[in-house]
Image (tube, rainbow, N blue to C red):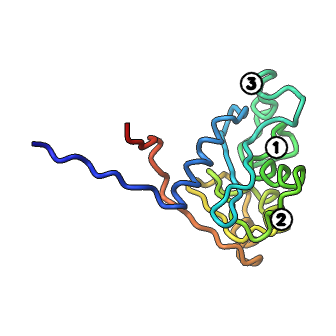
Amino acid sequence: MPQEKKYVRPSWDEYFIKIAMLVSERSTCLRHHVGAIIVKNKQILTTGYNGAARGVKDCLERGCLRDEQGIASGERHEICRAIHAEQNAIIQAGRFGVDISDGAMYCTHTPCIICAKMIVNAGIKKFFTYTDYPTTGGVTELLDEAEIEIVKMKKPETKINILD
């Protein structure tokens, strides 16, 4: 008789990073699907994915301006129509009056320098990720100086493990 595989619950960190992965599926970016969530005391406070500003056409509808201009990933962020996932998660907190200070951010990618500065000023204390975002540098140094712990995780399985 074959032995049944034992179900193993994901750790809290695995659970939250997998939720960030799921959030990334809402992205309207043609280059990267990025998802971020902000957590405090094991409670999800906000989520964000990369996409165009509220009420304007996104890249799925109008095409990628960065591709049209041949701009490499991680450069000239001001050309992009999208608001980054980390920015959207922070903006949602402000919009709804949610205190994210001393929280942790779980994000599918490391932040760009603009997002890193926002993370510092938002009071985030820990940043979890599993993928490096192509950036021009300075991110790790900034987060280190601000005493924000960066936790690089192994990419979790994309499979949802449930008992049927």
Front in this rendered view, residue 147 or 47:
47
Q: Quadrant of residue 163?
A: top left
Q: Is residue 78 left or right of residue 137?
A: right
User: Where is mark 2, residue-wise?
Assistant: 122
Q: Secondary structure at mark 3?
A: helix
**What residue would you read off at disc 1?**
83
Nearer-N-terminus badge (1/2): 1
9, 65: nearer the viewer: 9
Q: Residue at x 14, y 43 (%)?
A: 2
What element does badge 2 sit on?
A: helix
- Tell me if mark 3 has few (under 14), some (14-19) or many (20+) residues whose alpha carbon lies within 10 angstroms of its own: few
Q: Quadrant of residue 8?
A: bottom left
Give the amino acid type for the residue marked by disc 3 in the picture.
Answer: Leu
Looking at numbered disc 2 in the image, what kind of residue is underneath it? Ala
Residue at screen point 77% across, 51% down = 89
Q: Total of numbered circles in the picture?
A: 3
- In this rendering, the answer to whether 17 lies above or below 147 is above
In the image, farthest residue toward the front? 164
Tell me residue 25's x, y (percent): 63, 36
- Mark nearer the N terminus (1 vs 3): 3
- Judge from the rendering whether residue 67 lies leftward or rightward of residue 2; answer left or right: right
x, y percent for residue 31:
67, 36
Q: Nearer the viewer, residue 109 or 46?
A: 46
Q: Which residue is mark 3?
A: 60
Residue flagged by tag 1: what amino acid is it? Ile
Where in the figure is residue 149, as x and y percent of width and height? 65, 73
Q: Are marks 1 and 2 in contact (CB under 8 Å)?
A: no
